[in-house]
Image (cartoon, rainbow, N blue to C red):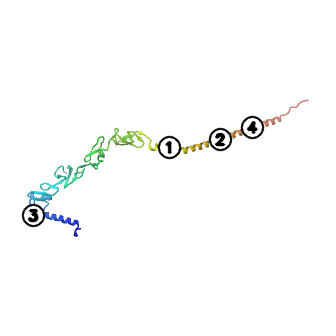
Amino acid sequence: MIFGFTIKHILGYIDHLYQFSNTIWKIAFTYECFGKSICKNNTFEEICSGRGKCVNKDLCSCDEGFTGDECEYIICFGKNSSDPQVCSGFGTCTAPNSCSCLTGYTGSECQFPICYGKNSIDESVCSGHGDCISPNNCSCHEKWFSENCNITMCHGIRSDDITVCSGNGVCSMPNNCICMDGYSGDDCSVIVLRKDENPEFNPSWLLFLLLLIIPAIAIVVIIISIIVILKRKKTQQIEKKKEKEKSETELENVKIAQMMESFKPKPFLLE
């Protein structure tokens, strides 16, 4: 703030003073330019298209950014609005260095075409495999095709075909398959074990398994030995019992035979 005035107030006052002095200049020098003057038209907007000063008979001094006999043309980036190449030929010069682009073009000078939502200088335009030469018109690089250059071939099959890479991978570049886990080969046709099915050899795991298996085997052997011994012992007991029963049976038979013999009548002898 200076002497109670803000910068905004000061700038506004300077602008008002400039407009006032410009009006005084136009009234003081009432030249006629192309049939128009302050005396005839009662307005400054019609003289020199409202974009300059009539400094002499049919001579306009145009404001910056305008050109033409009557300052009727706008200048955009060095070209006036009547030039077919203004705004790269793809837009309208609506104000000094301000282009209104046609649909499908962008950039300060409408110099960039747009392909499928991306302008031509975007690295990913045309899927990164082509050049955007006009709106939604891609010129694809070698071995890429389709409207957006997103299709290629892998071993004779289109990348959007479900059978590409043997149906076990993705065709990411020409003749370059990225295989799914469990498949290998140029065209992903070779089946391989997945990492979780083919763990790497680890000696510590082997030692751990041996420490578990060996005692288990020893316990099983002991149990089997005990069972065999008990079975053999039982078999021996059964055999002894059978022999004893056989002996007792034979002894009983002998006794019976003796008893039967004792009951036989004795023969009488005649004297």
**Within 10 Å of the Cα at label 4, are there few (<14), some (14-19), or many (20+) other Cα atoms?**
few
Q: Is residue 159 left or right of residue 81?
A: right
User: Which residue is identified by label 1?
Assistant: 203
**Within 10 Å of the Cα at label 3, are there few (<14), some (14-19), or many (20+) other Cα atoms?**
few
Front-lying residue, 211 or 161: 211
Circles 3 and 4: CB atoms closer than 8 Å: no
Q: Quadrant of residue 212?
A: top right
Amino acid type, residue under disc 4 in the picture: Ser
**Nearer the observer, disc 1 or disc 2?**
1
Inter-mark Cα distance, 3 to 2 = 140 Å
Sequence-first disc among 3 and 2 = 3
Q: Residue at x 77, y 37 (%)?
A: 251
User: Which residue is identified by label 2?
Assistant: 229
Circles 3 and 2: CB atoms closer than 8 Å: no
User: Which residue is identified by label 4?
Assistant: 247
Q: Is residue 67 above or below residue 243?
A: below
User: Which residue is identified by label 3?
Assistant: 28
Q: Is residue 249 left or right of residue 113?
A: right
**Nearer the observer, disc 1 or disc 4?**
1
Amino acid type, residue under disc 1 in the picture: Pro
Q: Position of residue 75 (x, y in %)?
A: 17, 54
Q: Position of residue 153 (x, y in %)?
A: 33, 40
Inter-mark Cα distance, 1 to 2 = 39 Å
**Within 10 Å of the Cα at label 1, are there few (<14), some (14-19), or many (20+) other Cα atoms?**
few
SS label for mark 4? helix
Sequence-first disc among 3 and 1 = 3
Sequence-first disc among 4 and 2 = 2
Inter-mark Cα distance, 3 to 1 = 106 Å
